[in-house]
């Protein structure tokens, strides 16, 4: 499922609203361990584009805080 979520996020990354919507949905589908991996991957791939969205979406999910440079 994690690979599927990554594929979807790449495909919708052209649109800020779609990206946020799909990222939020992914948190409902994935297990906690997969969410941690997704968080790392999203920060690595999309921090330059969607830092605000990443912080917002993952701040609503109760995990350890993310650090984005």
Image (cartoon, rainbow, N blue to C red):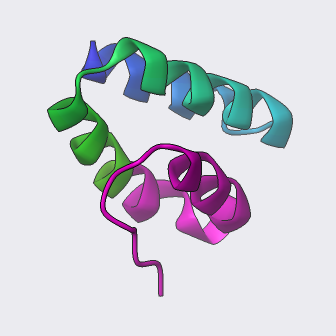
Q: Position of residue 47 (x, y in %)?
A: 55, 66
Secondary structure that dominates the magenta span: helix
- Quick one: quadrant of the N terminus? top left
Give me the residue at 55% from left, 56% from top: 59
Q: Residue furthest front?
A: 62
Is 10 or 54 nearer to us in this picture?
54
Q: Position of residue 25 (x, y in %)?
A: 57, 19
Q: Is residue 49 magenta?
A: yes
Q: Residue furthest bottom?
A: 69
Give me the residue at 32% from left, 41% from top: 38
What range of the chain is rendered magenta?
42-69
Q: Is residue 16 magenta?
A: no
Q: Is residue 32 left or right of residue 29?
A: left
Quadrant position of residue 14: top right
In this rendering, is residue 32 above or below 45?
above
Give me the residue at 68% from left, 59% from top: 50
In this rendering, is residue 44 above or below 20?
below
Q: Position of residue 55 (x, y in %)?
A: 60, 62
Give me the residue at 38% from left, 68% from top: 65
Quadrant position of residue 5: top left
In this rendering, is residue 37 above or below 52?
above
């Amino acid at each position: 499922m994690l690979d599927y979520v990554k594929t979807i996020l790449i495909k919708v990354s052209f649109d800020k609203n779609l990206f946020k919507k799909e990222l939020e949905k992914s948190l409902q589908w994935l297990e906690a361990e997969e969410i941690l991996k997704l968080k790392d991957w999203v920060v690595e791939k999309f921090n330059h584009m969607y830092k605000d969205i990443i912080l917002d979406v993952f701040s609503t999910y109760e995990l350890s805080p993310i650090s984005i440079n």
